Amino acid sequence: MAIVNISAWAKKTNTTLDEAARGITINLFSSIIMDTRVDTGRLRGNWQASIENPITAETSRTDIAGTTTVSAMKNKVKSGVVNIMTNNLPYAETWEQQDGMVAKNMARIERNIKAVVRETQ
């Protein structure tokens, strides 16, 4: 039912379902990146987007502002595929448990999609 309603929303806003899905993914991933705590910028800079399979290596990128990481992610995210976001630093999970940068943004996206579904019913 949600796919049909998101499809109606996409039609209403003159976008394709693929464009809408890509936009939701970029919004989610950008929010996760920007909600990641910053000390040296290493944790924020280690977010990596991939297609179909998760990246298993760390990157040496540091990104205090987050703009380089968001830009790299936007260039990677595609429509019609499984987009994956990973952070392979050993302490990323610890900070997720404390700060919830992934969990709170997943919940926010879910609320937003539900709102879109209500608008198009």
Image (tube, grey):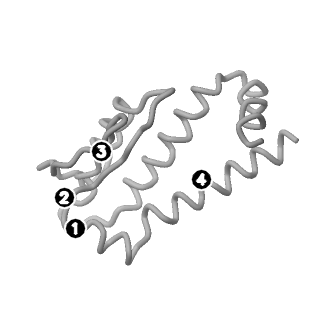
| Residue at which label 1 appears | 39
| Residue at which label 4 appears | 109
Kind of residue at badge 4: Ile
- Assess whether mark 4 and mark 2 are in contact (beta carbons under 8 angstroms): no
* On screen, residue 38 above or below 32: below
Kind of residue at badge 2: Arg
- The span from disc 1 to disc 4 (Cα, nearest Å) is 26 Å
Q: Is residue 85 left or right of residue 68?
A: right
| Residue 118 in the image, given as x and y percentages of width and height | 83, 48
Q: Nearer the viewer, mark 2 or mark 4?
A: 4
Q: Secondary structure at mark 1?
A: loop
Q: Earlier in the sequence, mark 2 or mark 3?
A: 2
Crowding around mark 1 (Cα neighbors within 10 Å: few <14, some 14 to 19, many 20+) is few
Numbered mark located on residue 42 in the image: 2
Kind of residue at badge 3: Pro
Q: Nearer the viewer, mark 3 or mark 1?
A: 3
